[in-house]
Amino acid sequence: MKLYQLTIHEAQAKLRHGEITAVELTESVLERIDAVESRVGAYISLQPELALRMAQLADERRATGEDNPLLGIPLAIKDAIITQGVPTTAGSKILEGFTPPFDATTVRKLREAGAVFVGKTNTDEFTMGSSTEYSAYKITHNPWDTSRVPGGSSGGSAAAIAADEALGALGTDTGGSIRQPASFCSVVGLKPTYGRVSRYGAIAHGSSLDQIGPFGKDVEDVALLLGAIAGPDPLDATTLNAPVPNYAADIKKGDDLRGTRIGVPKEYFVEGMEPGVESAVRTAIDRLATLGAEIVEVSLPHTRYGIAAYYLISTAEASANLSRYDGVRFGLRREGDDMWSMFRETREAGFGPEVKRRIMLGTYALSAGYYDAYYLKAQQVRTLLRRDFEQAFEQVDVMVAGVSPGTPFKIGERANDPLQMYLSDVLTVTLNLAGACGVSVPGGFANDLPVGLQIIGPALGESAILRVAYQYEQATDWHKQKPQL
Ligand code: GLN
């Protein structure tokens, strides 16, 4: 077994016992990147020298007796999350050349925990997309089939984990951007409850929906990473003032799922779901039942309005958030005859077609005369969706469903069909609208392509969903299967 193949908890045991050093582990990951990155394309930028310096520092910290689950662990950070001194683009030409003078809170916490940063991963521009094809920089290939997309928008982070190009990663999820690529690449990815993790330094897409969350090779790694980044933050007033449990310990409580009530939302077997995906999800539900869980059918009756509400609210918020890219403060600037033409030229040159489409949709939804019909209506639907979830969680502890109605599609197949791309988010956007948490775990294969199982929890239900995910993982070996690259 090569060092780059280790999980975080396996590597940590070896580091602790002095069997390996953080420098050796990091070198192994860098060699792996050299060997496969030309076929995967997970990273927008790599910082190998910085990584080796951080690894050396971690080894020095360990030599002084320090111990920490992430000390010396090589991680990848989505390029939509701010890293001090390292270029951050959000997948957009408008931020080309921007090197932030500060860290996102999550990045600062990982740095303090002694993690090693290998590089910044590819993302759809400003995290708008479901395939990573809307990145202004490159195409990321799915390690399971390089003619297919890795999902998105955190496709780079998911592909990096699947290809063993990092031991763990951070992504962001506004409407599914952690869970859907995790599902497409057969890795674990968790979207925390809104407010569980600080958004400070996450480049804003839809501020009432965005959350940063972890990717890992297994559930325990994701629990460790979540524990390291969660918690209240004075720099993000929307963070929840709730103590951070020991997730990595909580997942191992109990030997099975007896006493756990798991809801299956009947609306989540949507029309158009691929039969192979549906049968994988149903098989997984049967497996949860054999572990002792009580399976209950539940209803989330407003599900079918989720996509419409999401694409009104997220574009409205995005149109406001993206107004700051004007050529004055960061990144690209194109001169014009006056200030207004400079703004126009800069935005025309710097934003790609999907971002422009969303700015127009959002501006329209917020404009006088249409506000009541679109934005306000969408907010009302959001309340109904939130109530759906509250009512379901009166009956059950967690819910399970698919993540995406389909398996990874071919590169190019949907890039020019935005509506088709939007519709594929049907099973994920509702959680962001409702403020719930969710994790995608490897749930099998359909036609040799990965299928994720989504485990959904109420606000601050991370321990509960991770525990179910862990029990399921122990009973299956999907997470142990690796792509042949
Ligand atoms: N695919 C969704 C979108 O394009 C979700 C993206 C995300 O979660 N960042 O908006």
Image (cartoon, rainbow, N blue to C red):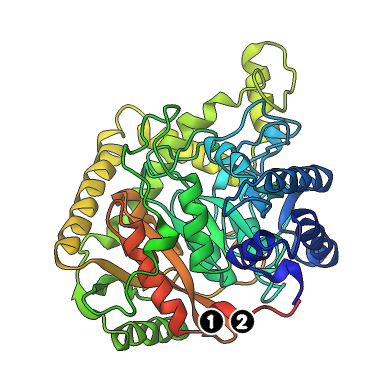
Q: Amino acid at mark 2?
A: Gln
Front residue of 57 and 95 = 57
Quadrant for the C terminus, please: bottom right
Q: Is disc 2 in contact with disc 1, using a CB cutoff of under 8 Å? A: yes
Q: Is residue 290 above or below residue 259?
A: below
Instruction: Give the x, y percent position of residue 154.
Output: 58, 55
CA neighbours of label 1 inside 10 A, class few (<14), some (14 to 19), many (20+): many
Residue 478, which numbered label? 1
Q: Is residue 70 above or below residue 210?
A: below
The answer for how far apart the CA atoms under marks 2 and 1 are is 5 Å
The residue singled out by tag 2 in the image is 481
259 lies left or right of 437: left
CA neighbours of label 2 inside 10 A, class few (<14), some (14 to 19), many (20+): few
Instruction: Give the x, y percent position of residue 360.
Output: 49, 37
Picture residue at 78% right of the left edge, 46% below the top? 56
Q: Amino acid at mark 1?
A: Trp
Q: Where, by quadrant of the figure, is residue 480 drawn?
A: bottom right
Picture residue at 50% right of the left edge, 36% below the top? 204
Picture residue at 41% right of the left edge, 37% below the top? 316
